[in-house]
Amino acid sequence: MFSAGASLTGLKPQIASLPCARSTAGSTSLQLYHVSCPIFTQAAMSYGPADTVAPSAVGSALGLIFSGVGGASQLPYTLAVRRHRQRLGPCRATLDSPEVAVLVDKMLASRPPPGNREKLSKCLALIEEVNSKDPSKVEYGGKRYPYRVLFGSWLASWVEKLDPGAPDELFVLARGKNLESWRLVEIKRDDYSPNTAGQKQWEADRKTWLANRLKAVMKEAGYVEASQKLVEDFMLNRDLPDPRDVRLYDVTGPMGTINFRLLELLLMVQTLRDAESLVFLEQTFPRMFEELPADEVLAAVKRELAGASKKCLATALQMPWSSLQRKLLGRALPAPPGWGSVLRELEGVAAASTHPGDWRYRDFDYE
């Protein structure tokens, strides 16, 4: 039907009427091409009403035509027929992934010893001095403490248990992320426009105020500008890597080099998250368990443990819980990364669904 020297301009009217135009005439033209051209037979593309023909099948068949006629395997842009490209799912690798965990161990082994931490001691003393003026008092262990002093000590204690050799900035964040936060009421919401933009600006200004307050204390303690900027990035959640989305090529370079600086930053983010989750479980969860309905407690625990590491989850399960508390925690534990993909491979798409009325259960064999 087509010769090697045939011009492609003569094909445009027929191709324009193919099923990509969603017309009955397109279906008829496709049948004529299928009968008269052996290339369509090789493509094994079914034909029928225009709405039943898959665009990907049309694209593959047209690709065979043009590769046989003009030697070009790429379809012209003017045809508006594009092959379907399967998109890869998001990365689910974490610091607990085997290939990344080995690099984390190497980074921890190459850490220099902490040495003398005079600046850290001075900075923590300044933070405690400021937070001791907190008007909110709570009772703990038979005594009353300023709330922000107590919370900072809880958080710093868990950071030290999870990573004793962590950088100074992480301990400063644990103790001072709520530094003098009772003064945030001075930044009034009424001073901003009553819309979404005003709400976001108000929240950003509050975070900036806290970050600047903590930076001032660090500067007084003698920390350099780089340390202050790192703490500011944490306070503003700015330019921080996600430890739940780590690729091997992100932390490795040519000739086997390892980006220890990025690994250290990832570990700092993960350790701070884990410490906050453990403080919640240790101090807030028992009271919530006694006073709130089980479904509300379960939702809160799931939210807190969503970004926890394996080390954090193992530590949480080793705490002294009652049988009912342990059962609820077991239901709240997050699924391992990639667990949905494992279920899809082993038991089909329907097994990976979490909704009992999902359409993917249609052909699922419950036996």
Image (tube, rainbow, N blue to C red):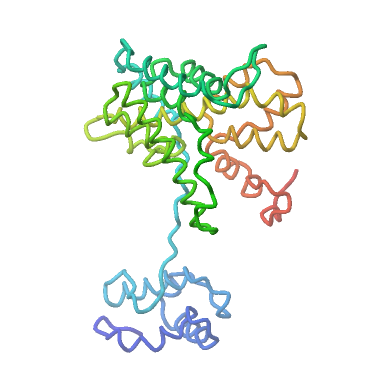
Q: Nearer the viewer, residue 340 or 246?
A: 246
Say which quadrant the C terminus sits in: top right
Query: Which percent across, then down, holds residue 182?
Result: 53, 33
Residue located at (52% from left, 46% from top)? 188
Q: Is residue 126 left or right of residue 10?
A: right
Which quarter of the figure has residue 147?
top right
Q: Is residue 366 left or right of residue 343?
A: right
Q: Nearer the viewer, residue 103 or 129?
A: 129
Identify whether 248 is placed above or below 125. below
Q: Is residue 311 visible?
A: no
Query: Which percent across, then down, holds residue 175?
Result: 46, 23
Which quarter of the figure has residue 70?
bottom left
Query: Which percent across, then down, holds residue 207?
Result: 45, 40
Residue located at (55% from left, 58% from top)? 194
Residue located at (31% from left, 28% from top)? 227
Say which quadrant the N terminus sits in: bottom left
Identify whether 107 is placed above or below 47. above
Q: Is residue 265 left or right of residue 336?
A: left
Name the residue at the left extreme.
Answer: 255
Query: Which percent across, then down, holds residue 315?
Result: 57, 19
Q: Is residue 294 visible?
A: yes
